[in-house]
Image (cartoon, rainbow, N blue to C red):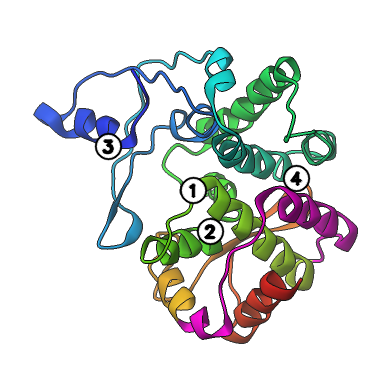
Amino acid sequence: MVYRPWRVLLASTFKRGIDFINIPTTLLAMVDASVGGKTGMNFNGLKNEVGVFNDSKFVILDTEFLKTLDSENILSGYAEMLKHGLISNDKMWAQLVNFEISNPDFGLLQTMVADSVAVKKNIVKKDPYEKGIRKALNLGHTFGHAFESWSLKRKPILHGYAVAYGLICELYLSSIKAGFPTDKMRQTVNFIRENYGTLGITCDDYDELIELMTHDKKNKAGIINFTLLESVGKIKINQTATIEEIKETLDFFREG
C-alpha cells in the first residue's frame, strides 16, 4: 500500500476509527508523515486545515523503495531530514549538509533515515499532541506552509521544497532574533539553494504570504508563531516576529 495521508484520515474517522498500518514508499512519508500520528488534508486552499491525531498500529519501513524515486521526491523528503538535523545536534546537521544528495549513497542514506525517524519519534513520545516540544518539528513550516499554499494557486510545489524554502527564512529569522550562528545559517542556505533552487515570489506577494501565515495552526490570538533556533539543537518555540521582520526575511529569501 502506498502511504497517503487522506487514507489515514479516512481510517481515523470511518466507524469512529479503524486500525491501520503505514507502509511509506517515499522519503517524505518515511521520515515525516508516517510517524507521529498526525493526519491532515488541505482545505479551501490552506495547508492541513482538516485532520486528527491517530497513530498507526505500526509502520513498515523499507528504504529499498527509495531507489525507485525521482530526484525531486528524494529532495522533498530530505528537507524534513535536514530539519531533524537542525533540531538535533551538530554531527547530524553536518552530515546532512555535506551529503551528496544529487548522487546519493543509498547505503548511507538508509542509516540517515533511521537517525531522522528516531529524532521525530523521540520528540513525539515526549509530546504526542503538540502542546510543547513537538512544536520543534514545525521549524521551517510557518513560512513553508505559506509558500505551499501560495503555490497551489499558481504552480504547485512539493511539500519538502516548501519546507526547504521555509528553512531559509526561519534560519535567517533565527539569526536576527535568536543569535543562530551566521556561518551555519549560510552553509545550510547555500545547500538548499544549490539543490532546491528558489521560488519566484516578488515583493507584491508579501501581503498574501503574510495573510496565509495567519492561518497557521500554531498561531494564537492572531499572532504568527515560529519555531526558531539559538543554535543547532537549541530550540525556541512560540516565537513571534513583526511584520517588518517578516518582510525583511522575505527580502533575504529573494535576494539572499
Report the residue at 83% width, 59% height from top: 186
The disc placed on residue 144 is 2
Q: Pick the quarter of the image with the C terminus.
A: bottom right
Q: For the residues carrying marks 3 and 4, which lies nearer the camera in this image?
A: 3
Numbered disc 4: secondary structure? loop
> What distance separates the C-alpha of mark 2 from that of mark 3?
20 Å
On the picture, is 140 further left or further right than 176?
Answer: left
Q: Quadrant of residue 77?
A: top right
Q: In the image, what residue type sits under mark 2?
A: Gly
Q: Earlier in the sequence, mark 2 or mark 1?
A: 2
Report the residue at 75% width, 21% height from top: 105
Is the stretch drawn in magenta largely helix, strand or loop?
helix
Q: In the image, what residue type sits under mark 1?
A: His
Q: Are marks 4 and 1 in contact (CB under 8 Å)?
A: no
Q: Which of marks 3 and 4 is nearer the N terminus?
A: 3
Report the residue at 69% width, 44% height from top: 87
- Tell me the residue that label 1 is attached to: 159
Q: What stretch is highlighted in magenta?
A: 179-207
- Tell me the residue that label 4 is attached to: 233
- Tell me the residue that label 3 is attached to: 6
> What distance separates the C-alpha of mark 2 from that of mark 1?
8 Å
